[in-house]
Amino acid sequence: MWDWIGKLDELRRQDQLAVLVTIIRSTGSTPRKHGAKMIVLPDGSFFGTVGGGVPEFFALEDAKKCFEQMQGTTSQIPLKPRGEFPACGGTMELYMEMINNNPRLYVFGAGHVGQALCQVLEGTPFRIHLIDDRPEWIDSPAIPSGVIRHKRHYSDVIKETNWCDQRSFVTILTFSGAVDQQVLEEVLPKPTRFIGMIGSKGKWAKIKENLQGQGDLSRVRCPVGHDNGGQSPKEIAISIASQLLATYYGRE
């Protein structure tokens, strides 16, 4: 038996989206039986097999649909003879399970609000990536252990991230309005579901003027967060978390 558990762990550490295909029922003559698995990646590459030939073809086609819709499914594959072409004659039922499809939140800035946002969102569906090249902030013990820290320049992280318009969320919370604008300029062309930036209405008006014609600025929420009247880092983080969760669950 191939080490599918080890492969799933490797993909988890790589933050790689995948579909786990499992035969949950088989009747009659089939090339593989109940429990056989394969793992499919978005580019069509795969590991393991549910029988090769026709079962594998349909498994790959159904996995493709899972990636398009970002949700799992079940499917039945009848292996019946067609005309002069022989087949096993049985039936297989497959369960297609999305793996590593949690929403990704990229928090640019590990300052007071960024750290508070990481704390507030602990225990929610978001898998948080915190980006800041300042060691004194990104190495803070106040940041929850489950947060993925990137002690690197924001441009490098933006270039190397596998952006997805269904599961990529961005909050821009750096120490400088100029840096906020630079991050936004680089993130704006990427496929994302949410882009929010901290700041006043006056700051946003100036940034819109500076970036006019460089992308769809109507996608950007600035000031980010629901207006709860709070001014402390934790209160601001709660307002941002509320807006992120409302977007993720389709409430706005």
Image (spheres, rainbow, N blue to C red):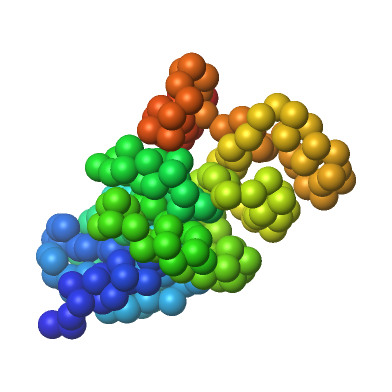
Q: Residue at x 36, y 52 (%)?
A: 127
Q: Is residue 242 visible?
A: no
The residue that appears at 52% across and 19% down in the rendered structure is: 227
Residue that lies at the very extreme toward the front in this rendered image: 136
Q: Is residue 156 left or right of residue 167?
A: right
Specify the farthest residue to the top.
229
Tell me if I can see residue 203 in this picture. Answer: yes
Q: In the shown orientation, is residue 122 left or right of residue 170?
A: left
Image quadrant assignment for residue 35: bottom left
Q: Where 146 falls versus 200 (above or below)?
A: below
> In the figure, is residue 185 to the left or right of 27?
right
Q: Say which quadrant the N terminus sits in.
A: bottom left
Residue 83, placed above or below residue 188 = below
Residue 99 placement (x, y as % from top left): 32, 59
* Camera-nearest residue between 130 and 215: 130
Q: Residue at x 78, y 32 (%)?
A: 205
**Quarter of the image holding residue 135?**
bottom left
In the depicted view, which residue is nearer to us: 87 or 34? 34
- The image shows residue 158, relative to residue 191, as above or below, that is below
Q: Position of residue 142 (x, y in %)?
A: 29, 51
Count of numbered labels shown in the rendering: 0
Q: Position of residue 141 (x, y in %)?
A: 28, 57
Q: Residue at horizontal 68%, vertical 46%?
A: 177
Q: Is residue 136 left or right of residue 52?
A: right
Q: Quadrant of residue 11?
A: bottom left
Q: Residue 27: x, y in percent?
A: 14, 61
Viewer-side residue, 56 vs 153: 153
